Image (cartoon, helix red, strand yellow):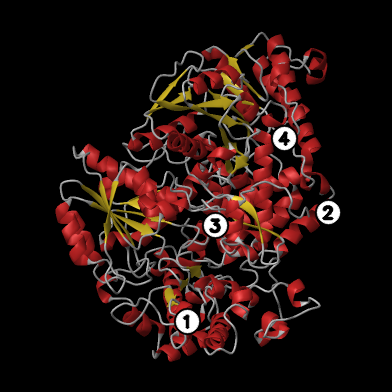
């Protein structure tokens, strides 16, 4: 809510923007002096072209101090009603072990890590992700798993396209009508642009015909019934089709695995392994398959390799970020995962171990058996068949109304099926008292059975043929850490192997690793946000709805668009959703033939991959010598494809870190040819308060809340990628089959939950609320200042590849290292590894220009930290010069051998032509605090040739 304005002497003196922005006023003045400007505004006027500047300032509520913003958000949170939800439908309440809650979810040492592209300083989370992969393969009985997906529904969609790629084509994908409804809806969304026809029905009656390349079944299904899919899988294989099984991971503790039943792939969500409901996300989806299909599997994959000294080391495996390699030929646009949530789920399994999981699953199943017996005593019929934790109760309309009324009096939510029957899905938190309450609701005033008295009749309902007999979680990591002392030390040991923002700046271009303030993070564990089922009735989710509405309004003010959707739960999902909106717009105008998408050659690899998944044909637009879009080539391409032009995808500021002055002309050329402009908002951190995408000519834009709007990267996820659109596109914003959302003529959903990763939206709400218009604008100006300061300081040592006509960069700069290969044999990777010895994560390496580094300091870093980074890069340049001059050999120098581990520096024998001091402490400030990489340089090619992606011969603790 917006508070009335206060007189200046009554305002809270705690200005959050002063804490968010790193440089002090004195530091800002010193950096401006280096750049030759008297004030920050004078610098910005010179650096940001006047022709792109917005004509009006941001109109947002006045900034609130931390305590004030938290109090306002608490008011919003209290509008949510936390009822006990037995809705199920793929979401279950769970108990997050406090040792995991406090030491991982609430710990910046875990949630401020970046994606583990620099594996030597990511060994801790890589091990946790390897544990996740091992957990999934053990549960599913399949040979290989990726390191998590965005949610269950999108995992199913990814599996569908994976099956098609494996089979080399096909037009029909079958999905059981007993799959969760949100999964079926996302499948249809994904299938339509690719020319795939999703057929739904009864699996027993379905007949495989030529053209059917795959099928999806649910295990247990959305009614709770556990079916034996062995014969179905056999029929599919006989017809040449593949089978994907969406499987509940807690049920798999007791049930025969999908692999044993004949499935070729399994998908699902590990949410009920200790991750709060959170209004629908973020949660770790999973996808497992056979080893033969490893190269077709989408998403990230952690693999085992060895380091420079031959010791086991982990890294991301070969197909990771496949869209950057395959671009428009990619079968997936996913370039992220849900790492923080996957880590939590894997640690939940480590904490409980196989026996603990059996106890939890067994108790949940026993509660369901007691409920089943009680319902029968009450004369109620359930859908026949064995079950694990869910029962669908057949009721008349009057019965259902009475039961729901009694449940509401007890603050209990049940699932209401379209035919009026009721669903009850039990979970880890269900106790005897709640079971008695449920039976009382269904008794409708009749004599109610007592749960304890039903035990004698509650026999095992799982057929012997479906009971799990295979081993579960045999690796020692799942049996070692069951005391809190040992678990705490294991978590901390892994944390110590990873560099996060708690150690130093992470200067990754295009990734915006800014401050994730503690006040922003606190609300995500409030029960009013954490314990809400995504399909709870609307009257119970007013807090979330109001928060989403406010956040959408603020984002529209910031971007200039008319409406927004918070549903996409990753930047790549936002790209895809935005392109689907454009596609639908053309179709509704009778121009469905418009399928050409223009994409600059400098674009992020997800752009062409997203366009391909949206059913578009990619035409590449050239860039000029300065890295800008070549206007002549653009005009030629728009003229050539005018009849079929659907869209231009453009990143602004450009992927090369420059404000292109011709952006308005670029957009006008596309509009003149009948196309729409999609703006990739990855670089929005350079726009907020200075210019608006809608005013520049964009029609739809995605925003990375995990970049510009302060949601942390979580070691590689979660992310949130909402889209904002102009009025003519608003009616096509994505909807949802179970919760009213989206535009009047909404596209299908792109994520499983109506508001995607709702649980992390309070972070961005807090950020905007505390910063206010002036604070956000100052942050943008400071980000641009910091980038130009680094570019200026390092220019004598590393030329900047691209600058604008005015000689400045935007919020990031590309440092040129290409000439060093010829003069010294040093490449960008060597510089990246050497920076680890200084306690820094490398900038973005070899993208968008090979053998360069792209540096983005963000506004949150102080001048002192920028100077430390510049000093490190200057020392590295001197080391390169020593190699160039022959003072150090090309094959034995600090860069070639980096990173240097503690044990390598402490080895009895030291034969290198430089000192141990140079290796470990190349600058004086490292003596105050030293981050040690836990492994030497990782041999990535060896790991790809010897692919191993589950726990095995690696250290076990």
Give the structural element (helix, strand or loop) at label 4: loop
| Label 1 environment density (alpha carbons within 10 Å; few <14, some 14–19, many ≥20) | many
**Picture residue at 75% right of the left edge, 35% below the top:** 472
Callout 2–callout 1 Cβ contact below 8 Å: no
- Between marks 2 and 1, how big is the CA–CA gap? 43 Å
The residue carrying mark 4 is: 429
Return the disc, 3 or 2, that comes first in the chain's sequence: 2
Residue furthest out toward the top: 379
Query: Which image quadrant is residue 862 in?
Result: bottom right
Q: Residue 235 placed where, x, y %?
A: 52, 18
Query: Are there few (<14), some (14-19), or many (20+) residues within 10 Å of tag 3?
Result: many
Q: CA distance from mark 3 to mark 4?
A: 27 Å
Identify the mark nearer the N-term, 1 or 3.
Answer: 3
Between circles 3 and 2, the one closer to the viewer is 2
Q: CA distance from mark 4 to mark 2?
A: 25 Å
Question: In the rendered image, which quarter is residue 907 located in?
Answer: bottom right
Q: Is residue 955 above or below residue 285?
A: below
From the image, tell me which residue sits under label 1: 790
Q: Secondary structure at mark 3?
A: helix
**N-terminal label among 4 and 2:** 4
Residue under label 2, please give it.
Answer: 486
Write down the residue under mark 3.
763
Query: As displayed, is residue 859 above or below residue 881?
Result: above
């Amino acid at each position: 809510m917006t508070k009335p304005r206060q007189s200046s002497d009554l305002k809270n003196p705690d200005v959050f923007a002063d804490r968010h922005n790193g440089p002090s006023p004195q530091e800002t003045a010193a950096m401006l002096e280096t750049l030759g400007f008297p004030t920050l505004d004078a610098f910005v006027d010179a650096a940001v072209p006047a022709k792109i500047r917005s004509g009006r300032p941001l109109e947002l509520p006045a900034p609130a101090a931390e305590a004030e913003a938290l109090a306002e958000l608490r008011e919003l949170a209290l509008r949510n009603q936390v009822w006990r939800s037995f809705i199920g439908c793929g979401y279950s309440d769970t108990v997050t072990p406090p040792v995991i809650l406090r030491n991982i979810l609430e710990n910046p040492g875990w949630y401020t890590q970046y994606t583990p592209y620099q594996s030597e300083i990511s060994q801790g989370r890589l091990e946790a992700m390897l544990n996740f992969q091992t957990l999934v393969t053990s549960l599913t009985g399949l040979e290989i798993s990726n390191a998590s997906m965005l949610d269950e529904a999108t995992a199913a969609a990814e599996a569908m396209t994976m099956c098609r790629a494996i089979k080399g084509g096909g037009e029909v994908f079958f999905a059981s009508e007993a799959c969760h409804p949100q999964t079926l809806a996302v499948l249809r969304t994904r299938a339509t642009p690719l020319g795939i026809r999703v057929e739904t029905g009864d699996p027993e009656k379905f007949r495989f015909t030529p053209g059917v390349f795959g099928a999806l079944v649910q295990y247990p299904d959305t009614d709770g019934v556990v079916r034996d899919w062995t014969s179905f899988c056999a029929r599919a294989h006989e017809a040449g089709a593949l089978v994907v099984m969406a499987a509940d991971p807690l049920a798999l503790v007791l049930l025969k695995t999908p692999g044993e039943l004949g499935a070729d792939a399994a998908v699902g969500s590990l949410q009920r392994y200790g991750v709060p409901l959170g209004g629908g996300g973020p949660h770790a989806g999973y996808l497992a398959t056979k080893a033969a299909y490893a190269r077709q599997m989408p998403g990230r994959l952690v693999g085992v390799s060895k380091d420079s000294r031959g010791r086991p080391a982990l890294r991301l495996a070969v197909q990771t970020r496949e869209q950057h390699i395959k671009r428009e030929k990619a079968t997936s646009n996913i370039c992220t995962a849900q790492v923080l949530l996957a880590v939590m789920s894997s640690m939940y399994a480590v904490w409980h171990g196989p026996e603990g999981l059996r106890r939890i699953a067994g108790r949940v199943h026993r509660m369901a058996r007691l409920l089943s017996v009680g319902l029968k005593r009450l004369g109620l019929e359930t859908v026949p068949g064995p079950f694990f934790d869910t029962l669908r109760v057949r009721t008349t309309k009057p019965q259902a109304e009475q039961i729901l009324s009694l449940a509401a009096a007890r603050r209990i939510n049940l699932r209401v099926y379209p035919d009026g029957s009721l669903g009850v899905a039990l979970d880890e938190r269900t106790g005897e008292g709640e079971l008695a309450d449920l039976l009382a609701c269904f008794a409708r005033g009749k004599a109610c059975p007592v749960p304890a008295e039903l035990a004698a009749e509650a026999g095992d309902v799982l057929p012997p043929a479906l009971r799990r007999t295979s081993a579960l979680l045999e690796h020692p990591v799942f049996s070692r850490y069951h005391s809190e002392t040992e678990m705490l030390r294991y978590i901390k040991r892994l944390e110590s192997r990873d560099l996060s923002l708690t150690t130093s700046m992470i200067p990754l271009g295009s990734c915006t690793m800014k401050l994730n303030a503690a006040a922003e993070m606190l609300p995500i564990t409030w029960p009013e946000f954490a314990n809400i089922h995504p399909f709870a009735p609307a009257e119970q989710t007013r807090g979330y709805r109001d928060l989403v509405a406010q956040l959408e309004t603020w984002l529209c003010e910031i971007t200039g668009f008319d409406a927004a959707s918070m549903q996409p739960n990753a930047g790549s999902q936002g790209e895809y959703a935005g392109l689907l909106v454009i596609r639908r717009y053309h179709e509704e105008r009778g121009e469905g033939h418009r399928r050409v998408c223009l994409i600059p050659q400098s674009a992020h690899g997800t752009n062409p991959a997203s366009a391909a998944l949206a059913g578009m044909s990619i035409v590449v637009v050239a860039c000029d010598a300065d890295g800008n879009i070549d206007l002549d080539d653009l005009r030629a391409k728009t003229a050539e494809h005018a009849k079929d032009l659907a869209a231009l995808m453009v990143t602004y500021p450009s992927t090369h870190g420059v404000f292109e002055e011709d952006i308005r002309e670029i957009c006008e050329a596309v509009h003149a040819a009948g196309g729409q402009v999609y703006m990739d908002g990855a670089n929005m951190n350079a726009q907020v308060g200075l210019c608006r995408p809608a005013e520049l000519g964009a029609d739809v834009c995605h925003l990375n809340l995990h970049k510009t709007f302060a949601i942390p990267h979580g070691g590689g996820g979660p992310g949130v990628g909402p889209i904002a659109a102009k009025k003519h596109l608003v009616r096509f914003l994505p909807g949802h089959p179970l919760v009213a959302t989206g535009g009047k003529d909404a596209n299908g959903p792109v994520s499983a939950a109506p508001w995607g990763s709702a649980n992390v939206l309070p972070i961005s709400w807090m950020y905007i609320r505390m910063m206010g218009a002036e604070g956000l604008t100052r942050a943008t100006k400071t980000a641009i200042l910091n980038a130009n300061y680094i570019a200026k300081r390092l220019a004598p040592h590393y030329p900047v590849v691209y600058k604008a006509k005015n000689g400045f960069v935007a919020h990031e700069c590309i440092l040129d290292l290409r000439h060093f290969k010829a003069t010294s044999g040093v490449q960008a990777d060597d510089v990246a590894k050497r920076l680890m010895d200084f306690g820094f994560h490398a900038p973005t390496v070899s993208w968008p220009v090979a053998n360069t580094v792209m540096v983005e300091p963000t506004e949150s870093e102080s001048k002192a930290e920028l100077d430390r980074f510049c000093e490190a890069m200057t020392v590295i340049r001197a080391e390169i010069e020593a190699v160039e001059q022959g003072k150090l050999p090309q094959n034995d120098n600090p860069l070639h051998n980096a990173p240097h581990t503690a044990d390598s520096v402490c080895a009895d024998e030291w034969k290198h032509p430089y000192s141990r001091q140079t290796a470990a402490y190349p600058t004086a400030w490292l003596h105050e605090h030293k981050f040690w990489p836990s492994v030497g340089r990782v041999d990535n090619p060896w790991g790809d040739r010897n692919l191993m992606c589950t726990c095995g011969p690696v250290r076990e603790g």
